[in-house]
Image (spheres, grey):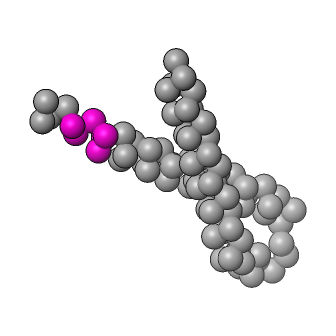
Amino acid sequence: MKLIGIEALISLVVQFSFIWLAFKSIQGLHIERLFRETPKTLPLLNVLLSVTIGYTSASFFMAFFDTIRNLIYIVK
């Protein structure tokens, strides 16, 4: 049971880290320059895009390392 809790904690930390990284990356793009008038909902779009990209990247990252961890069962 303790192992499941540790894996859940690691998963949360990785997901929030990737979301934060995606948010900082999207902020660096300066999307507001593409519009004559900046839409009021542009910050919401930035947040939703960063959550989408960050969650997808974190899921890939976690699945990749989970698959590598399970490769030892081929040898056994």
Judged left or right of residue 70, residue 40 is: right
17 lies above or below 63: below
The overriding secondary structure of the stretch rendered in magenta is: helix
Residue at the left extreme of this rendering = 75
Residue drawn where x is 22% and y is 39% of the image: 71
Write down the quadrant of residue 69 in the picture.
Answer: top left
Residue 37 spot, x, y in % from top left: 85, 75
Residue drawn where x is 78% and y is 63% of the image: 42
Residue drawn where x is 29% and y is 44% of the image: 68
4 lies above or below 16: above
Residue 69 on the magenta span: yes
Residue 20 spot, x, y in % from top left: 67, 58
Residue 41 spot, x, y in % from top left: 82, 58
Write down the quadrant of residue 36 in the picture.
Answer: bottom right
- Residue 39 appears in the rendering: yes
Write down the quadrant of residue 22 in the picture.
Answer: bottom right
Residue 32 spot, x, y in % from top left: 76, 75
Residue drawn where x is 78% and y is 55% of the image: 44
Nearer-the-camera pick, 21 or 27:
21
Residue 62 on the magenta span: no
Residue range corresponding to the magenta coloring: 67-72
Judged left or right of residue 40, residue 29 is: left
Nearer-the-camera pick, 4 or 33:
4
